[in-house]
Image (cartoon, helix red, strand yellow):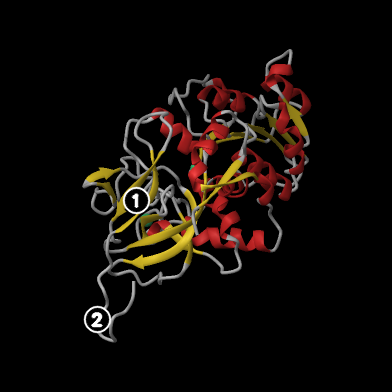
Amino acid sequence: MSISSSTSIEPIGVITCKAAVAWGPGEPLVMEEVEVSPPQPMEIRIKVVCTSLCRSDVTAWQSQAIFPRIFGHEASGIVESVGEGVTEFEVGDRVLTLFTGECMSCKHCTSTKSNMCQVLGLERKGLMHSDQKTRFSIKGKPIYHYCAVSSFSEYTVVHSGCAVKVSSRAPLEKICLFSCGVAAGLGAAWKVANISEGSTVAIYGLGTVGLSVAQGAKLRGASRIIGVDINTGKSEIAKAFGVTDFINPDDCSESVHQVVKRITDGGADYSFECVGDTETITTALQSCCDGWGLTVTLGVPKVTPLISTHYGLFLSGKTLTGSLFGGWKPKSDIPSLIDMYLRKEIKIDELITHNMPFEEINQAFNLMTEGKCLRCVIHMPK
Ligand SMILES: [Zn+2]
Ligand SMILES: [Zn+2]
């Protein structure tokens, strides 16, 4: 956009750009020319720089019914234009997208106990929060959003409460991981469980989220961090992120919660479910100790959303809790995590197993489906 004179500003127009559109469940994405509307009041339009693929993109792509759709919710970019009323962002600002926003004024945003914004919380219908419409279309037909972010497009529109400004020193090709997985894992360890020094921890599922829980536990001084995963190939990287004991349940002659209980003298102080499987939630609950054992669930269940477990587990003093985005208030808390990364106090580079150009995005979906990657970072055209 250019300023044509000192008094008149050209109206912000529609942008036509490339986006990876999912036309049906599990169908390969197709590169399409999409029209991206101008940002509406309190929205910003972002030129996406890098976006990583998260397991929940794949889960939604395989199991949900909202199509055609543009997935992607871990992204970094540069503000291209701002809608009416936006004072927080300027064209050219470097930002991270947020799949769960922070309006700063609702009951939850003003409470220290919650990050579940009532205005800009997790969006499930594929629309924008403000007017229940889409900002993407092809020949006038709407293309739906994912979590009101939709970063698998060269340009996207998000609510200004669903983005956060980042330091000019932060490498955009790396920090996109803080948009979801890494922040979720660290927050579960620090904010939700508040792991104490010397404690024992069991983590089910060693993807990006589980490894970030491990890193969080290690930095809190946990004495034993037990990582459980059916892929033994993950044991090396797990060690690098703080896992002290790796268990592949397929190699065990007894049930995995019994193994955890045996090596932790009756159960871990904390357990984390990072798989997205409701049966594993029960196993995680069974592997923590009586009295104060705490289980935190982070995974998004793929098939069965209902949890079924014996009430006796709760009578014995165990607690089960969930968390979205690690309990962080996204706009308020994420910049400090990025600062920690810049001071080399937390590591994320090792989680990036693949880098690829936007055109090869289907390869990232294949790698994630086959369990052959942690994070694939997709680089948008310059
Ligand atoms: Zn709010
Ligand atoms: Zn995610």
* Amino acid type, mark 2: Ser
Image quadrant, ligand 1: bottom left
The answer to whether 305 appears left or right of 274 in the picture is: left
Residue 160 in view, yes or no: no
- Residue matched to label 2: 8
The answer to whether 190 appears left or right of 124 in the picture is: right
**How far apart are the two marked residues, 1 and 2, measured between alpha carbons?**
37 Å
* Amino acid type, mark 1: Gln
Residue 118 circle label: 1
Q: Quadrant of the N terminus?
A: bottom left
Residue 173 image point, x, y percent: 58, 56
Residue 198 image point, x, y percent: 76, 43
- Taking the view exactly as shown, the residue that stands out farthest to the left is 140
User: Foreground residue, 369 or 138?
Assistant: 138
Residue 3 image point, x, y percent: 31, 79
Q: Residue at x 75, y 42 (%)?
A: 242
User: Foreground residue, 33 or 327?
Assistant: 33
User: Foreground residue, 136 or 175?
Assistant: 136
Labelled pair 1, 2 in contact (Cβ < 8 Å): no
Quadrant position of residue 163 = bottom left
Q: Secondary structure at mark 1?
A: loop
Q: Secondary structure at mark 2?
A: loop
Please determine whether, in this image, residue 174 is positioned above or below residue 264. Answer: below
